[in-house]
Image (tube, rainbow, N blue to C red):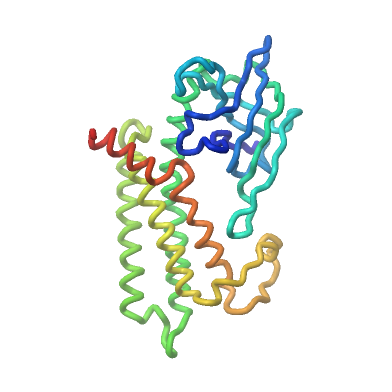
Amino acid sequence: DWWCQGYSEPGSGSDLASLKTRAVRDGDEYVVNGQKTWTTLAQYADWMFCLARTDPDARAQRGISMLLLDMRAPGVTVRPIRTLDGGHDVNEVWLENVRVPVANLVGEENLGWTYAKYLLGHERTGIAGLGHCHRELGILKDMAARATSRGRPLLADSRMRDRISRIEVDIMALEMLLLRVAASNGGTPGPEASVLKIRGSEIQQDLAMLQMEIAGPDAWPYAPEWMLADAAYHGPGPEMAAASGAGYADMRKTSIYGGTTEVQKGIIARLVLGL
């Protein structure tokens, strides 16, 4: 089964507690109406864990519930959003009189915000992308070894080696911090997840930027159809550089989804520094 996350809405992203999707009790079912956006891989999903307002009179965080919603139910419409890299990872999801059994309520009614915060802690730890960083570092080193400037590999340039080494040290520090967080609090991420999310986002963006710089003008040509079809590459420039521009554009989102960098800094200021 594929699952997608029904959190963000138009106008309710960083301020998630302001969400407008409503779930009204009707006997043994909830009737859900609203819209979700930036829903990752909703085009493949069988189910959504969806935040909806079940008590409009309660204060924002207290009136939200989490429902398990069948994506094949009548009234669910998925529309693609094409991103800067030409890909289709995210979607709009329209919910029009979608009926959800009361049995699909997660936990208690109106406590969905509590469950969502718990899940976001794990999500932000994952967004740090340690495995992604190690993989992209390997690709970066390979690109620098194969690309040349004035007849010499870029990896032979001391300034390039210095930039790569700095990123590698950052990844090592990120890994140590991730292990410390995983070993504390019984494996339940606390506000430290916000530190991981910020640093992981920054490192992933640094990796993508340096890859694009190494690729130079060869980073520009990009055809998603070729990559999705796993076909032979026939574009200009070396194959390793073909997706660098698209990768750079795609990585801009890491400092936005899962809670923007500004939101994470607010959490750190309040819960870690006590400001």
Q: In this view, does 30 lie above or below 69?
A: above
Q: Which residue is drawn at 50% across and 38% down?
A: 13
Spot the residue most to the bottom. Answer: 151
In this picture, residue 199 sits left or right of residue 98:
left
Spot the residue most to the right. Answer: 74
Residue 112 on image: x %, y %: 50, 23
Q: Which residue is drawn at 38% across and 55% down?
A: 202
Residue 153 on image: x %, y %: 42, 83
Q: Is residue 235 above or below residue 229?
A: below
Q: In which quarter of the image is the C terminus?
A: top left
In this picture, residue 270 sits left or right of residue 71:
left
The one of 26 and 19 positioned closer to us in this rendering: 19
Count up the numbered dots.
Answer: 0
Residue 86 falls in image quadrant: bottom right
Q: Which residue is drawn at 45% across and 23% down?
A: 61
Residue 268 on image: x %, y %: 30, 39
Q: Residue at x 43, y 59 (%)?
A: 205
The one of 204 and 79 positioned closer to us in this rendering: 79
In this picture, residue 153 sits left or right of residue 1:
left
Residue 138 on image: x %, y %: 44, 66
Q: Quadrant of the N terminus?
A: top right
Q: In this view, does 235 lie above or below 34?
A: below
